[in-house]
Image (cartoon, rainbow, N blue to C red):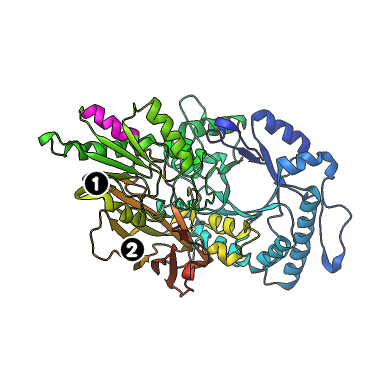
Amino acid sequence: MHEESGDEKRKRVSVGIYVSCPPNIKGAIETIFEYGYHFLVTQLTHPNYTRILQKGKFPASIGRTDRVLKSSEWSRLVVGELTSHIDVDSEVEHIQENSKNLFLQELGFATHLSVPAILISLTKSNNIQLARILNDKLNSGFSYSVWINIPMIHPSRYSPIAEMEYDTWDWWNDFRTYCSYDKRLGIVLELPDIKHNVPTYELERWIGEPVKAVVIPTSFFLTNQHGKPVLSRAHQDIIKKFMSIDVQYIIKPDTEGDLSMYVRYLHFLGKKLYVQDTMSEFVQGCEDFLQNPLQPLTEHLETNIYEVFEKDQVKYDTYQNAVYKAIEAFPKENGKVPVVMVVGAGRGPLVQAVLNVSYTLNRKVKVYAVEKNPYAINTLIDRVNNEWNNKVTLINEDMRTYEPPEKADILVSELLGSFGDNELSPECLDGAQRFLKKTGISIPYSYTSYLAPLQSIKIFNEIKTNRPIDKSLLNCFETPYVVHLVNYYQIAPPQELFSFTHPNWSEKINNQRYKKLKFQCKQTCVLTGFAGFFETVLFKDVNLSIHPDTHTPDMVSWFPIVFPLPEPIHLTEGAAIEVSFWRAESEDKVWYEWCLEAPVKGGIMNPNGRSYFIKKH
């Protein structure tokens, strides 16, 4: 199969072609390569070889000799389709037995040829015997991927004579559940014809699945005014959705015509439909990659992390706008100069924002930069001497214990994490507000976390299969991860969880929280965890957000945070999802606990922060 490199990776598409039993497989591969295709989908055995495999008598020949291709060609260029009429779930015993023998033989032949993937079509709802055989093989460690071929919409849903309707997602979900969500299982979806398009909510659910390829029959192409094949707008919209998860495409010829035109059109479509925006450029290579949240109070950030933060001009422009409005609102009488303290100054982007405002408004500002990282202070000293004309006072101390010579009018910080409070912004700013005047302003003023139920088998499998040697599997599932989510389905809209406001002049500050949220599932799906987001009010009407509905355009600083569940939970349409969530703390740490309460009750995750916590010291 094909992978693009560099800038072309997300613009071009990988296209294969289905050819049923070509007379000459070597010639077929050479021809499709000339046309521009990247791989061939074809049967591994040949229908000319009749195979009755009862009583263990295997015929000597089952198909073409493996010598028709080099091993490197079998292992890169051929997806092997298994015989479609095999029925290991037949209720007729001798058919079931013969089918099982045929199926095992073909699986063995696929192993012998080292093909990268095999293609198996599901043709009915009951596939338990098929799943058992494949699950045995998956657990015995065979090397190829298994592609399960199903239509996006089953014909029974629009047939006037069908006695019952089938949802092929249910077929797929049952099958992969039997196989314990093995990561080598993927889907090949057949595009529906133009008269029977997929509802948007179902398409979003498919985007949350491990879709390996989409099959497009040539009869679905229209002819434009130049006599060239094109897809309808509705089909283009479907393909655009799947571009986010980098699926491949399989052309299935069911009409006459020049086969090279279809692959050329799909390459064109890839460039036409793919939008290379700021976010997609920034996150390339990070898709669905698990990152541990930062521990900024106990671990000094490194240059590369500061560098990533500082690339987000939108965030700093928004902060600068908030500082501008705050200083503009500061009274001018008696020649008072506002005192601005940037706490957690890092390498100085917020300090620069404050100075920019001072120049723009032509107003003097007294600026302090408080930063505990001694290596970042080294950078700040250079900027004070060579960029800022000694207009900034540097303080190399922890904001929670620093005793300033004067109090600030404006406190500016960027201590927010993907969940708002998960990098201990509340604790830091509660400590730092000692040196803020009672009339002073904190930027940010407030922030709120949000939670949404999530289906992502990709994330579930990433956690399950990448366990560090020093952690148990339970530890891994009790750890939240920062993830740029791509291959996922958000089951319901996010709901508000915890809020914090600064300054907080309460006599007894309490940053522990508890809340129970209830969501409703609008279609059958699988719950694998919860995705967390946040919104913040910096000052008055100046906001930043990673909430999916209010996301600040082109801002790339924060990815969502994911709180996993140890096992996927099957949800039916209309089911209630209830989760309890805690923010807890002790003298030296802060942690989250979460517990699924419906549709089934689960154990409380991460009790006492046993698997994950944020250190205070």
Residue 14 sits in quarter: top right
Residue 281 is situated, as x and y percent measured from the top left of the image, at: 48, 35
Residue sitting farthest toward the right: 60
The magenta region covers: 352-361
Characterize the magenta stretch by its predominant secondary structure: helix
**In the displayed structure, would residue 343 be above or below residue 28?**
below
Residue 568 is situated, as x and y percent measured from the top left of the image, at: 52, 65
Q: What amino acid type should be assigned to the residue bearing mark 2?
A: Asn
Question: Can you identify the residue that label 1 sits on?
Answer: 407
Choose between 18 and 296: the one closer to the eye.
296
Q: Residue at x 10, y 35 (%)?
A: 334
Other-residue count near label 1 (Cα within 10 Å), few / some / many at <14 / 14–19 / ≥20: some
- Residue 224 seen in this snapshot: yes
**601 displayed left or right of 350:** right
Q: Earlier in the sequence, mark 2 or mark 1?
A: 1
Q: Disc 2 or disc 1, which is closer to the eye?
A: 1
Res. 93 mark: none
Q: Is residue 488 magenta?
A: no
Contact? badges 2 and 1 (CB < 8 Å):
no
**156 displayed left or right of 363:** right
For the N terminus, the quadrant is: top right
Name the secondary structure under disc 1: loop
Question: Can you identify the residue that label 2 sits on?
Answer: 511
Other-residue count near label 2 (Cα within 10 Å), few / some / many at <14 / 14–19 / ≥20: some
Q: What amino acid type should be assigned to the residue bearing mark 1?
A: Lys
Name the secondary structure under disc 2: loop
For the C terminus, the quadrant is: bottom left
**In the displayed structure, would residue 576 be above or below residue 422?**
below
Q: Residue at x 52, y 63 (%)?
A: 170
Residue 436 is situated, as x and y percent measured from the top left of the image, at: 25, 49
Choose between 63 and 303: the one closer to the eye.
303
**In the displayed structure, would residue 325 be above or below residue 298?**
above
